[in-house]
Amino acid sequence: MVTGWPAVLVEGDVRLRPLRRRDQDTWMALRAQNAAWLEPWDATSPVPVTGPRPSFGTFVRTLSAQARAGVTLPFAVDHADRLVGQLTVSSITYGSLRSAAIGYWVSEHVAGLGITPTAVALATDHCFETLGLHRVEINIRPENGPSLRVVEKLGFRDEGVREKYLHIQDKWCDHRTFALTVEDVPDGLLRRWRSRTVG
């Protein structure tokens, strides 16, 4: 078993849990309902992909295999026991770097309710406290206002622009990189987020 996986992380009505094949119907419905909300930020392949798209089952099996290998943590995001999005910890690296990247999406109907910052705080603390990582980063398109508000609320450090960083919607797009190290949140990111929401 890989350290830190499988994991269920909970704060109030927000729960992170492993993404499962049985999530297919709800996940597919959410993606369809939120196509205009999410597709401008979805990564695409710079190499033409031929043939049918992988099934949801194949998608989950691939992520689960990566989780077992210790390089990815594919979380479903639940709110009040209902699937509302996904958060993935990827590019998990040990050795002298000990870093990972977090990506996420939630349905537009729950955006702005504090679900995503809470989910990111839970995952970040899991990376630092359970996986023993040193740094977590989030890469965001400069035009993606809702996602930029997440890292602003959580106090991630803006480390600048990575030009032509990721292929999205058939072109190479700039991203801003935001990061935290374990020294930035000695008492945990969730605790800091709680203090800000109470304040």
Image (spheres, helix red, strand yellow):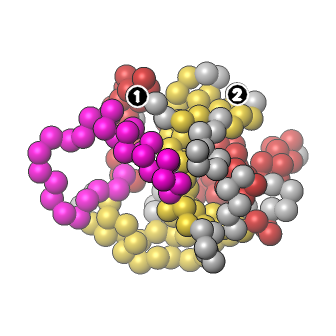
> For the residue marked with disc 1, what is the amino acid?
Arg
The magenta stretch is 42-71
State left or right for residue 155 relative to residue 83: right
> For the residue marked with disc 2, what is the amino acid?
Asp
Residue 116: horizontal and vertical position, in percent?
A: 61, 43
Please identify, in this view, whether the residue under mark 1 or under mark 2 is nearer the observer. Answer: 1
- Residue appearing at x 46%, y 76% in the figure: 162
Number of other residues with Cα within 10 Å of mark 1, as a class: few under 14, some 14 to 19, many 20 or more: some
Q: Which corner quadrant holds the N terminus?
A: top right
- Residue appearing at x 11%, y 45% in the figure: 51
Q: Which residue is mark 2?
A: 13
Q: Is residue 47 magenta?
A: yes
Q: Is residue 139 above or below residue 54?
A: below
Residue 95: horizontal and vertical position, in percent?
A: 61, 73
- Residue appearing at x 29%, y 56% in the figure: 44
* Mark 1–mark 2 distance (CA, rounded to whole Å): 22 Å
Quarter where residue 138 is shown: bottom right
Q: Residue furthest front?
A: 1
Quarter where residue 170 is shown: bottom left
State left or right for residue 45 relative to residue 88: left
Residue 109: horizontal and vertical position, in percent?
A: 52, 30
Taking depth in this image into account, of 86 and 110 the one nearest to the observer is 86
- Residue 21: give its label: 1
Taking depth in this image into account, of 51 and 154 the one nearest to the observer is 51
Secondary structure type for disc 1? helix
